[in-house]
Amino acid sequence: VVYSALVQTVWQWNSVFVSLFLRTTNHHKNMSKASPSTGKSSDEIKQARRRLSVMSDNKLVEGFENSVTLEEPEEVASTPSEGGFIVNSYGGYSKKGYAPYNPKKKNQDALIMAEDPKTRSLLFCVMDGHGEDGDKVSQNIKSKFANYLFKHKDFENDIPAALTEVVNRCEQEVLRDTAIETDFSGTTFTCAIIRNNHCTLCNIGDSRTSIAFRNKTGGVSAINLTIDHKPDMPAEKARIEAKGGRVFAVEYDDGVDGPARVWLGHMDVPGLAMSRSLCDAVAHSAGVSSEPEFFEYDFNPDREDMILVMASDGLWEFMSDQEVMDLAYSTTEPRFAVDRLISESNERWMREEQVIDDTTVCVAFLGNFQSNAATTASSPPK
């Protein structure tokens, strides 16, 4: 009886803690996303956006300095693709965000870019961790995912089957790791496997992959290749409610409703603003799923696909798909596109929120687009 009362008390205090910090916990993501088929204007995104903190470890830190210089990113890479890929060059970068009240915050994003010579496959993957140990979740998966996938028995002939099993294996290994807190920590997961003229995409959560093709006016048009998993999507909401969870938004002090969030049936936790994720044990007990959603895409040379961008929502928060592609189209190499995109998104974060979310961006140039300009050099965002 005493134990049960103690557990209930802990849960109640946790509920109070989450309610108090809804506006300052990194795993409570916003929902200002473009639709799968059309991008939103920057004005629409600004109207739809909701406050998001980038405090990665759920601890306020006193005594922060008035001026903080952004630290160097944790990963940078840029290389031309070889061996007949539709991708002629690609580059990626994962940059830690900035929170003035938390100078010790960690980059909870993770980026994977790898080639498998045996199957002539190219892998891109972005993860956006959240919660106290979100960085440990994403980095743990990053350390093993490509190796597991390329060695999987079905990878050569059945990519979705291989991805499903490897994603589940990675998640289960993290859940069993007692050094990682996974009750309220987890990550999004989006990846693309490009082989020959085809792309298989796998998505869990609200990181996103988009593509641009040349339009009739000589510019580019952008479309989403993946769909963001939000709790108020009809099918997602139905699954959550069938598991006993609840979906509702919280109204902030300024009267603006926040994004739809997932809650336990009997308690206002965890408040996760996505309907699918890896780990997040408490949210999963309320109907959040780690089941990947697959998308198949054939690159279309007749329509001239030109640019592929995969990123965490640090990029998409204040930039529409069309804005992202227009900016990338104005550059001569993927590494320059990554630089410009991260710099622009960071500036918008500071202008709108005075904080910056971790931002991970991978850009691939397709077909003959700027193929003569590709180099192996790398250049970190400013």
Image (tube, rainbow, N blue to C red):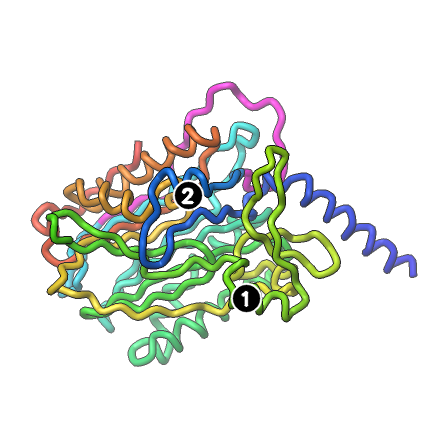
In the rendered image, which residue does mark 1 sit on?
A: 289
- Name the residue rendered at 40%, 60% in the picture: 227
Look at the numbered disc 2 and give the secondary structure of its residue. loop
Looking at the rendered structure, the kind of residue marked 1 is: Ser
Residue at left offset 40%, top offset 77%: 161
| Separation of residues labelled 1 and 2 (CA atoms) | 23 Å
Q: Main secondary structure of the magenta part?
A: loop
In the image, residue 230 sits, relative to residue 95, either above or below, namely: below
Q: Does the magenta stretch include residue 69?
A: yes
Q: Is residue 28 magenta?
A: no
Nearer the N terminus, badge 1 or badge 2? 1
Q: Which quarter shows the C terminus?
A: top left
Residue that sits furthest to the left in the current view: 372
Determine which residue is flagged by label 2.
317
The type of residue carrying mark 2 is Glu
Instruction: Judge whether residue 355 can be spotted in this image.
Output: yes
Q: Give the range drawn in magenta.
A: 55-78
* Crowd rating for badge 1 (residues with CA inside 10 Å; few <14, some 14–19, many 20+): many
Q: Where is residue 131 in the image (x, y as percent from the top left)?
A: 58, 48
Query: Which of these two is toward me, 138 or 19?
Result: 19
Which is nearer the eye, 290 or 181? 290
- Dividing the picture into quadrants, the one containing residue 7 is bottom right
User: Depth-wise, is mark 1 or mark 2 nearer the camera?
Assistant: 2
Measuring 38% from the left and 66% from the top, which residue is drawn there?
202
